[in-house]
Image: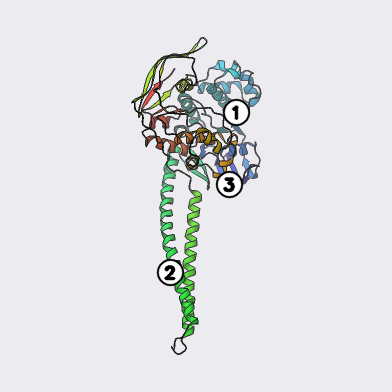
Amino acid sequence: MSYIQIEHLNFTYPDAVEPVFSDFSLHLDSDWKLGLTGRNGRGKTTLLRLLSGQLKGEGRITCNLPLRQFPCDIPDPEKCAYEIAESIAPEAELWRIQREMALLNLPEETLYRPFSTLSGGERTKFLLAALFACEGYPLLDEPTDHLDGAGRACIAKYLSGKRGFLVVSHDRAFLDSCCDHILSLSRSGAELVRGNYSVWREERDKAERADRAAKEKLESERTRLAAATKRTADWANRAEKEKFHLDKDAGIDRGYLGAKAAKLQKRANATKERRAKAEAEIKELLKKEETDEELKLCAAPFYKSELLRLNGITVKFGERTLFSDLSFAVNAGERVVLSGGNGTGKSTLFQIVTGGFSEYTGELYVPKRLKISYVPQIYEYRGTLQSYAAEKEIDEGYFKAILAKLGFDPRDFTRDMRLFSDGQKKKAALARSLCEKANLYIWDEPLNYLDVIAREQLERAVLASNATILFAEHDSSFVEHIATRRIVLG
């Protein structure tokens, strides 16, 4: 039987205040199709790097089979794909690589093309083929990043037929399709559930309901005990005073009053201890709690029902036509998703609408005074959150409150944004957009790098609003739940 054993693992980054892992222990079966999920910054990628040996921590990691990681460094991308496979997986036989490529719908001629000429989806599939052509346990870090829906479905189907792996992903439909165990990392440690994402979510919801009920009961008990503590303390103090202010001729036994005062003091101390225990239990429940507060998307109404119209838009790059004679309108209250494979022009279309690209023919109608809130795929982040809020002219306090709801650690509020993870950067962009009272929201793959909880928070916020949204996204669950209309490019 193959396994991975983690014992008393401790790891802290050099510039960090708190450890990522502290006395962390876990046993994993290598036959599990294991999905690894959790809030951004909880240590998912760090755990993969510790397992693969890229990072060194204190403690012990034992595994009785080779561990292989995706993605991996490509030393010379100008070499053909076959040579790349030889360098990263020298023990993989050619026929095995070809078999895996066929399972991933990757043409055999891909082997003989320069790796640099492959698309993002082709590179992902080829590296997975090379990895699974070798013996060992695969560690996969976000293999579906930037893949379109068809690419994600293909990889999910491929992985579902494999014996065992560990995959980091925030795509709910993907985790449902290919995983039989879910490992969630949270502030309180690790939670392992047998089943796919939907099973894990159901178990998590049950646990959260139980924790909320326990917390409410403890808070009620704490309030009652606070009053009881004060009452018994007052009684004990009065009894103690009576002991020293006796009328000698009253015939009252001083020993009796002393015993009474001692009994009341003991009762007061016991009540105080019970209150302290309730406080400790509430504190322990709060440590387990992951932020899942409701977000709000407050759109501004517009005086026209039609917010955007494109007539016959065509974009060409030399001999290549990106899209031709594209026409559609977006009306108030609609949530329109642009779908299509990678490279079909979704980001270019967003830039046309927002004024960032002018090399097109056709007509674009955007009403005057229409306020657009745009979240692009790529943005250069620099400075602190404070300077970012000032630059974007949004309320800093509200901006940071939204980030806190999205799981941001307050200690990150003063860090340079260039040091943020990709998930933190995307949360900053989305929090800024949520601060803006716009007539039209344009989001280009808003869920990239976001953890599962943040995805669900954003989904609920959109559904609870009357916002008009034009967006592109490959997370099929998000699209299925919020889109009111689909426009297919390509």
The residue lying toward the viewer, choosing from 235 and 355, is 355
Q: Nearer the viewer, mark 2 or mark 3?
A: 2
Which secondary structure lies at badge 1? Answer: loop
Residue at the disc numbered 1: 134
Q: Earlier in the sequence, mark 1 or mark 2?
A: 1
Q: Earlier in the sequence, mark 3 or mark 1?
A: 3
Q: Quadrant of residue 313?
A: top left
Residue 301 in view, yes or no: yes
Q: Are marks 2 and 3 in contact (CB under 8 Å)?
A: no
> Is residue 224 toward the left or the right of residue 64 in the image?
left
Res 25 label: 3
Q: What is the spatial separation of the Cα atoms under label 1 and label 2, in whole angstroms?
A: 72 Å
Callout 2 crowding tier (Cα within 10 Å): few <14, some 14–19, many ≥20: few
The residue lying toward the viewer, choosing from 22 and 297, is 297
Residue at the far front: name it. Answer: 369
Residue type marked 1? Cys
Residue at the disc numbered 2: 231
